[in-house]
Amino acid sequence: MLSSVLALVTLFGGALAVEYTCEDKAVLSTSFVGQNSDVKAETFSCSNSLSEFSALSAASTADDPTDVCGASCTTNCFTPSGGGPNPNDCQIIVDALLYDSQNIGALFTIAANTSGVAMTYATCETFIIDQASYDLTYCRDDWSNVVEYVAFNCQSTQNAHGGNCVATDERWFIQVQTATT
Ligand SMILES: *[C@@H]1O[C@H](CO)[C@@H](O)[C@H](O)[C@H]1NC(C)=O
């Protein structure tokens, strides 16, 4: 398990540890997923990109594959410690994503132009945002691995309260944070 996660995430490689807050959030759909239907899943759109990145990922070109399953990302923890999500709540999301991967499908779509998909359980929220100008496809088990890694490695003992994992080409990123609702 650990080696497969390490294939996906580069550890603390980046200087960017900017927490993303969705501006002008519009929730497009809400459902409850996982084996016990207790993890809230939302699709939503935002008006902003992750700050410090050029708008809508200048790094991408039309030739890049839209299926970003297995693509690597760089983990950044948010400092300082305190107020982070309970990693055991994040674990419920991890398990729900694995359950959905087996029972709904391995792949899911993230809509273009800073739209996203969020999963929330108790204190833990994670979301993935597509910063490209076209839809992307990602794998639920990869998302699950990233959530597990960030949730347990960006804790108060690491002087952190959650973190993100930003795709090498900056077209998408995953954030793990304290639930806002
Ligand atoms: C994303 O925004 C760009 C610029 O406004 C637009 O050209 C493109 O069609 C949009 N993509 C989608 C899938 O809506």
Image (cartoon, rainbow, N blue to C red):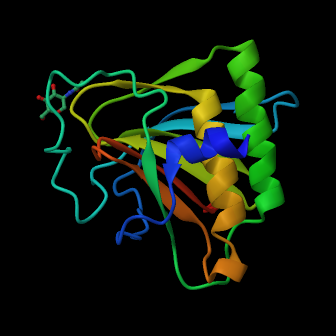
Residue 140 x/y as whole percent:
61, 29
Left or right relative to 60: residue 88: right
Which of the 4 quarters of the picture holds residue 20?
bottom left
Residue most extreme to the front: 3
Give the quarter of the figure containing the C terminus: bottom right
What residue is at 62 percent from the left and 44 percent from the top? 5
What residue is at 65 percent from the left and 79 percent from the top? 158
Above-or-below relation of 84 to 50: below
Residue most extreme to the right: 36
Residue 170 x/y as whole percent:
29, 47
Left or right relative to 122: residue 21: left
Above-or-below relation of 102 to 33: above
Which of the 4 quarters of the picture holds residue 80?
bottom right
Above-or-below relation of 29 to 46: above
- Regarding ligand 1, which quadrant of the image does it lie in? top left
As rendered, which of 163 and 119 lies closer to the eye?
163
What residue is at 23 percent from the left and 65 percent from the top? 52
Give the quarter of the figure containing the N terminus: top right
Total numbered circles: 0
Left or right relative to 85: residue 150: left
As rendered, which of 15 and 81 lies closer to the eye?
15
